Amino acid sequence: MSNVINITQDSFRSTVLESEKPVLVDFWADWCVPCKKLSPIIDEIAAEVGDRALITKVDLNQERLLGITYQVLSIPTLLIFKNGEKVAEMVGAQSKSKIMAKLESFM
């Protein structure tokens, strides 16, 4: 079972910006091959971090406004938020170790 939370425009503020924990946001689309390759890695990270951080996904096919708001120009794009602020950004497919290292630096 995945601990990944699907985010919409309506839930972004309460789930991401108002979280007391660091939040990883994966901006993706179903037609994006690198996004599909990254998806199982995101699931593994969610399982490993447990309740120390929130792992979320934004489907840009459904939530284009969020992509525009956060200037997502290429996917996959991973953003990390802490205390309501964007503190890190990774563009393109990343290794699990790189994502974990970045996320852990904010936990």
Image (spheres, rainbow, N blue to C red):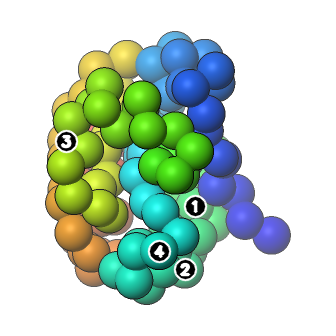
Q: Which circle marks residue 46 in the picture?
A: 1
Question: What element does badge 1 sit on?
Answer: helix
- N-term-proximal mark, 1 vs 3: 1
Above or below, 66 relative to 92: above
- N-term-proximal mark, 1 vs 2: 2
The quarter in which the N terminus is drawn is bottom right
- In the image, 48 versus 40, the foreground residue is 40
Disc 2 crowd, CA 10 A, few/some/many (<14, 14-19, 20+): few
Q: CA distance from mark 2 to mark 4?
A: 16 Å
Residue at horizontal 47 percent and vertical 63 percent from the top: 29
Above or below, 21 relative to 6: above
Disc 1 crowd, CA 10 A, few/some/many (<14, 14-19, 20+): many
Which residue is identified by label 4?
31
In this figure, what is the number of numbered marks? 4
Above or below, 99 relative to 36: above
Question: What element does badge 4 sit on?
Answer: loop
